[in-house]
Image (cartoon, coloured by chain):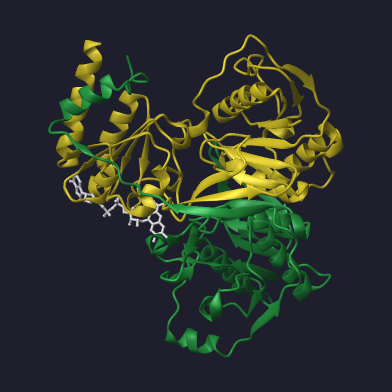
Chain colours: A green, B yellow
């Protein structure tokens, strides 16, 4: 089974993100692999272990991704890692486009059987790249999957829908986005990191980007601070909330 | 002139609340500018299903049973055909789990600008302002494509809209969009989950590690049912196995938009608060007067949840009896 996994990195602590004159300043940020991408990669590795002869390629489309992210993917167990360089990516559409192009170049006519992504990246939380990538590759898309059972022919998946647990059935090829709960990603030790250094890590260049569909137009910092009024007793609180009109939906 | 298509989601033969709000709000905004609106809904409907939808325009209804559990792929085929036929310039989708999965797929197919979670929710503003980095940054985005897709949550949908006009419903033949061997199918939904989704609740009582155990959540269930709300949780409470992941609120859980949020034994980590940026009034109960949750709260009580919550339940009952 050929599996491509798309990974990106996000700030370890969002509070390290600063805004200077309407622009984002990420210079103080420490980066980690996006947690949802860890679920995606872990699931790919589990499939590889179950289906002999499988190969997992990790792809990162972030100019500033750096080697650490890809080394982590290799240490977890990916066979190959590919960093796709491009000019600054403006939106999810450009990101998906760059990934789709790289997947096309790597796999040629035969698309991978599965493309796994995280449900969303924790920095911007657009949750758009996986679905857009599926559209560009001409594959169906199963989003926010929390359980996956695969055999050679088909896949059965679960996810939390708006009404409860949904069960899905699909044939290959497919793009899947991984939700929390899918698995518990493995930890890597010194030995895996040493081995990762011997694995192939390629850098490829994306061709000229299409126009973005959405363009960043500035930012401002937000304070979540409110002026908290401390209340002494629960009955005082109940009175305040009642007068505030909050108990309209309450039982009669 | 702008022409909008509203995707109406149905649940068990009824239009979901988010979709009703979305439809009525789009009608109101479109009416102000003299613009037009159409809608699409799939799957069998109860006779009264469209009763809460006001305004003008046409609602296309495809009866097929298969459309009560549609895959993103199937919906995308139908909606993109409708958009082309009607010449829509805007598509509005409620930010439910299904809506969030559909919108980017549709955006790619139509080459449209996807504007998700824009503060204010106006269809006519030049920029979409939305929170990024756990709600610590408010960023502005400019749509560049001629078609826009708006993904809108409940918070922007509160203003109600009444009109004596009603849209008319036209049946829609979806058969050309079914393919014989669909390679992605949603087979079943285990409902039985009759609990109200926290994403749609007007009142949420949430518990964290400070609740001390699974059993203590009975108190929060009692309070929530008394207030007509639902129970949510912090990640720690979910990780402890006290609550299912579907109850988790925050960056890696759900973003919620209740009128009232009561945080019990929750410290107020930035990742938790990220789910609360649209909550109107926040109440915090915590034994630590320096807990960061108080910085994000409108009202606070310093105390042990095991004492404060039962006393609060008693006080609420008393207030309600007097009314
Ligand atoms: C990438 C990432 C994503 C995350 N996503 C989320 C998310 O989506 N949602 C989320 O919630 N968290 C998330 N977290 C975790 C978050 O950082 C916190 O660890 C978590 O929110 C803490 O949960 P808590 O407040 O229940 O527990 P704690 O931080 O342990 O706080 C417990 C609180 O209870 C109080 N307390 C204890 N006993 C009592 C008592 N008897 N009576 C009253 N108060 C009491 C304590 O004073 C304390 O303030 C994420 C973290 C990371 C790194």
Q: Which residue is drawn at 75% across and 61% down?
A: A210
From the viewer's perspective, tell me whether residue A30 is left or right of residue A68.
left
Farthest residue toward the right?
B176
- Whole-percent x and y of residue A154? 71, 57
Count of numbered badges drawn on the protein: 0
Is residue B212 shown to the viewer in this render? no
Rendered-image quadrant of the C terminus of chain B: top left
Q: Relative to B267, say whether A228 is above or below.
A: above
In the image shown, does B112 or B244 lie closer to the viewer? B112
**x and y percent of residue A49 in the render?**
60, 74
Which residue is at the far top? B164
Q: Kindly identify the residue that appears in the image at 29 percent across and 29 percent down.
A: B222
Quarter occupied by residue B219? top left
Task: Give the position of the N terminus of chain B as an image quadrant.
Answer: top right
Q: Which residue is located at x 59 percent, y 44 percent?
A: B127
Quarter of the image where one finds residue B205: top left
């Amino acid at each position: 089974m050929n599996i491509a996994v798309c990974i990106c990195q996000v700030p370890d602590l969002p509070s390290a993100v600063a805004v200077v004159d309407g622009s984002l300043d990420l210079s103080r940020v420490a980066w980690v692999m996006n947690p949802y991408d860890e679920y995606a990669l872990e699931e790919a590795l589990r499939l590889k272990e179950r289906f002999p002869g499988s190969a997992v390629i990790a792809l990162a489309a972030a100019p500033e991704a750096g080697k650490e992210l890809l080394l982590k993917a290799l240490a977890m167990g990916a066979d190959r890692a590919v960093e796709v360089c491009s000019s600054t990516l403006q939106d999810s559409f450009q990101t998906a486009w760059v990934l789709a192009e790289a997947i096309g170049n790597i796999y040629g006519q035969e698309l991978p059987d599965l493309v796994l992504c995280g449900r969303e990246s924790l920095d911007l939380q657009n949750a758009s790249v996986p679905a857009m990538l599926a559209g560009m590759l001409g594959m169906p898309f199963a989003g926010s999957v929390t359980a996956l059972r695969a055999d050679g022919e088909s896949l059965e998946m679960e996810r939390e829908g708006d009404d409860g647990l949904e069960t899905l059935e699909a044939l290959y090829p497919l793009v899947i986005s991984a939700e929390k709960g899918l698995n518990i990603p493995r930890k890597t030790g010194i030995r895996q990191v040493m081995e990762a250094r011997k694995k192939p890590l390629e850098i490829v260049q994306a061709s000229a980007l299409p126009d973005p569909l959405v363009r960043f137009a500035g930012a401002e910092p937000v304070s979540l601070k409110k002026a908290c009024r401390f209340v002494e007793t629960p009955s005082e609180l109940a009175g305040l909330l009642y007068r505030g009109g909050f108990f309209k939906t309450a039982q009669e | 002139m702008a022409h909008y298509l509203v995707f109406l989601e149905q649940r068990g033969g009824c239009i979901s609340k988010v979709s009703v709000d979305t439809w009525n709000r789009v009608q109101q905004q479109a009416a102000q500018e003299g613009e037009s609106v159409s809608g699409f809904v799939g799957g069998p409907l109860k006779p009264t299903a469209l009763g809460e939808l006001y305004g003008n325009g046409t609602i296309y209804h495809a009866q097929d049973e298969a459309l009560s559990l549609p895959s993103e792929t199937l919906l995308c085929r139908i909606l993109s055909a409708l958009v082309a036929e009607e010449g829509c310039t805007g598509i509005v989708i409620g930010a439910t789990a299904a809506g969030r999965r559909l919108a980017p797929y549709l955006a790619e197919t139509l080459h449209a600008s996807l504007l998700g979670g824009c503060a204010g929710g106006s269809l006519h503003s030049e920029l979409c302002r939305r929170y990024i980095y756990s709600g610590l940054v408010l960023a502005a985005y400019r749509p560049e494509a001629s078609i826009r897709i708006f993904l809108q949550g409940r918070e922007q949908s509160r203003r109600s809209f009444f009109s004596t006009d009603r849209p008319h419903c036209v049946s829609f033949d979806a058969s050309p969009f079914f393919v014989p061997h669909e390679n992605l199918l949603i087979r079943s939904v285990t409902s039985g989950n009759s609990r109200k989704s926290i994403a749609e609740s007007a009142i949420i009582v949430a518990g964290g590690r400070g609740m001390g155990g699974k059993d203590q959540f009975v108190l929060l269930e009692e309070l929530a049912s008394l207030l007509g709300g639902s129970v949510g949780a912090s990640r720690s409470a979910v990780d402890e196995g006290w609550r299912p992941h579907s109850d988790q609120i925050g960056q890696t859980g759900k973003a919620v938009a209740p009128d009232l949020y009561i945080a019990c034994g929750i410290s107020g980590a930035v990742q938790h608060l990220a789910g609360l940026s649209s909550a109107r009034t926040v109440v915090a109960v915590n034994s630590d007067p320096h807990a960061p949750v108080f910085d994000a709260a409108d009202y606070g009580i310093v105390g042990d949840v095991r004492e404060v919550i039962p006393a609060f339940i008693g006080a609420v009952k008393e207030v309600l009896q007097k009314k």
